[in-house]
Image (tube, rainbow, N blue to C red):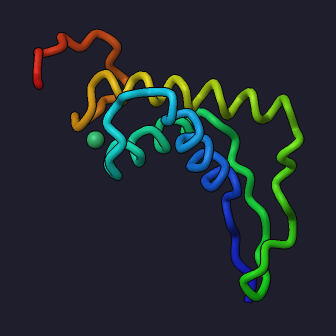
Amino acid sequence: MTGLINLMEETVLSKIDELWKNTEYCKCEQCKLDVATYALNRLPAQYVQSMKGKVLYRFESNSIQRDIEVTVAVSKGIEIVGNSPHKNANPNSNNVNSSAAG
Ligand SMILES: [Zn+2]
């Protein structure tokens, strides 16, 4: 039985951890998911086949170009989510009157 794994998910999640260290934003599970969702929607999926639980292909971590893309998308997501955490984010609205909440 084979399955599909999106390696980009793991890449994005580890990148969030890496970039979050330098910020003081909320780092709860919900915010992490929000950042990951934002980034993953802007990045190409990296599906690979898995067989017997083993991933056959490893993500090319030395792909500098791809790393830059991931870093940019995750950085943007961290900024957006961090500046307005715990809100029902509407990805299509740019002009949100920010209500000053704690
Ligand atoms: Zn949070």
From what the image shows, is residue 5 above or below residue 22? below
Picture quarter containing residue 91? top left
45 lies left or right of 101: right
Which residue corresponds to the image point at 34% horizontal and 13% vertical from the top-left?
Answer: 94
Q: How many labels does the image show?
A: 0
Residue at left 79%, top 72%?
55
Give the image location of residue 99, x and y in percent.
Answer: 11, 16
Indicate the position of residue 102 as horizontal and vertical percent values. 11, 25
Q: Can residue 40 be seen in this view?
A: no
Q: Where is residue 1 in the image (x, y as percent from the top left)?
A: 73, 90
Quarter occupied by residue 44: top right
Q: Which of 64 and 4 is in front in this view?
A: 64
For image coordinates 51% across by 28% down, the residue present is 22
Q: In which quarter of the view is residue 56 placed? A: bottom right
Q: From where the camera sits, is residue 101 visible?
A: yes
Give the side of residue 20 with respect to residue 91, left or right: right
Q: Quadrant of ligand 1?
A: top left
For this view, does 22 lie left or right of residue 31?
right
Q: Where is residue 97 in the image (x, y as percent from the top left)?
A: 18, 10
Picture layout, residue 45 above or below residue 38: below
